[in-house]
Image (cartoon, rainbow, N blue to C red):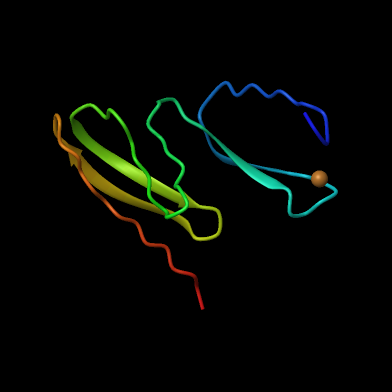
Amino acid sequence: MPGGPELTFTMSAPEDFLRFKCDVHPWMTGYIGVLDHPFFAVTGDGGAFRLEKLPAGQYLIEAWHEKYGTQQQTVTVTNDETETISFEFASQP
Ligand SMILES: [Cu+2]
């Protein structure tokens, strides 16, 4: 791994986003979420995300942003249909 040692961590339980940072360079920061299911996504350049192969059912979808916090929406998924939801985060004045 260029620039530093490779570190290994083992999480034994789900965790909300954990912040990892460099003690030397304040801009070097990352977040790790540990989930107990495979249904998650990271937004692309345009802010879109897609959760593939959700079984039919009702779900609470949570969106998280490192500066603007968390939002939740409930969505009902049926077999073979695509549902669309949207989250909007606004900066505080
Ligand atoms: Cu650094």
Is 53 or 36 nearer to us in this picture? 53
Q: Quadrant of residue 10?
A: top right
Q: Quadrant of residue 26?
A: bottom right
Is 83 or 46 nearer to us in this picture? 46
Residue 4 vertical placement versus 49 (above, below):
above
On the picture, is 75 further left or further right than 31?
A: left
On the picture, is 3 further left or further right than 10?
A: right
Q: Position of residue 58 (x, y in %)?
A: 20, 36
Residue 75 vertical placement versus 10 (above, below):
below
On the picture, is 33 further left or further right than 63?
A: right
Q: Residue placed farthest to the bottom in the image?
A: 93
Residue at 34% x, 50% y is 72
Residue at 45% x, 47% y is 44
Residue at 33% x, 43% y is 61
Q: Residue placed farthest to the right in the image?
A: 24
- The image quadrant where one finds ligand 1 is top right
- Dividing the image into 4 quarters, which one contains the N terminus? top right
Residue at 80% x, 33% y is 2
Q: Position of residue 11 (x, y in %)?
A: 60, 24
Q: Position of residue 16 (x, y in %)?
A: 52, 39
Q: Quadrant of residue 75?
A: top left
